Amino acid sequence: MAAVRPQWTAVRDARSALGLEDRTLLHAGPPLADPTRPPIPMLNAAVLSCLHEGWARTPDEAERLLSSGAVRLEPSYTKSVATPLAAMVSPKTTLAEIADEVGGSRYYAYLGTGAGPQQRFGTRDPAILEKLAFRESVLAPGFTELLDHPVDLLSLARAAIREGDDLHNRLSSATTLLNAEGGYQFIRALRANIQVYNLLDAEVSDIDYYFASRLQGEPVGGVEDIHVHPAVPRTLRVSLIFGF
């Protein structure tokens, strides 16, 4: 693991990245005992994927495709893909391409769709279909334009951990650092980078802690309460990088 240097190099749809065939869905975990009868959360996610792909017009039609085996469910690890919880990878799904700078291997990860209802939670909320369409039509082209050079994920992870992220449940700092960084290559030896922290200038807490503390006049034993670490206001950093 110490020898690997993962770089986020591109976003690609699963059809082109993996050669994923029509009417095939990839799921997390080992192979299902009976792929025609997946657990309810996975079934819900698979139904949404069928609707998203246009393989079915209604949830009932999608369920019939799944129960008949006309839509196949396969484990994602067979294609070197990571997908979270109940989320499904279908041919249209936008994936983050992660390349090892040292060994050259390539792996892929399901690209999330932001806050609110999510496919990975295994519900059939119709709002999820809008989010999937937004990812494919807006987020994918946007990231393609922004990823004009690889993003060093280990450097990003180290910076996020220093800000309080655990890189699993709490990712706000990593997201802020990533979404607000861009650059321009003037010539081979000169590049300008721009980092914007708290792009929307939101007045939010970056992390919350619960512990006992004591201010003047409070009980000797302190008061247990939530303590917040406010996010920095919108901050702009510009740097020039020269190569020799």
Image (tube, helix red, strand yellow):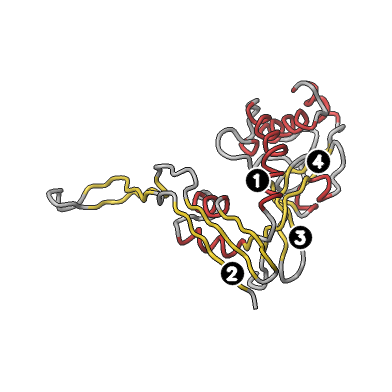
Q: Is residue 231 left or right of residue 38?
A: left
**Tag 4: amino acid:** Pro
* Residue 239 in picture, x, y percent from top left: 53, 64
Q: Are discs 3 and 2 less than 8 Å apart at CB?
A: no
Q: CA distance from mark 4 to mark 3?
A: 18 Å
Q: Position of residue 68 (x, y in %)?
A: 85, 29
Distance from Cα at disc 3 to Cα at disc 2: 27 Å
Looking at the rendered image, the disc whose residue lies closer to the viewer, 4 or 2, is 2
Label 3 belongs to which residue?
Answer: 106
Q: Residue at x 76, y 48 (%)?
A: 12
Q: Secondary structure at mark 2?
A: strand
Residue at 32% in and 48% down: 227
> Looking at the picture, which amino acid does disc 2 mark?
Ile
Q: Give the alpha-carbon distance from disc 4 to disc 1, as whole Å.
A: 17 Å
| Left or right, residue 174 beside residue 150 | left
Q: Secondary structure at mark 1?
A: loop
Write the residue at 76% across / 42% down. 32
Which label lies toward us, 4 or 1?
Answer: 4
82 to the left or right of 64? left
Q: Is residue 135 above or below residue 231?
A: above
Check disc 1 and report the residue beneath it.
84
Q: Which residue is mark 2?
A: 241
Which residue has dot 4 on it?
91
Disc 4 is placed on an element classified as loop
Amino acid type, mark 3: Arg
Q: Counting other residues with Cα less than 10 Å from the Cα at mark 4, is it few (<14), some (14-19), or many (20 or more)?
A: many
Q: CA distance from mark 1 to mark 2?
A: 36 Å
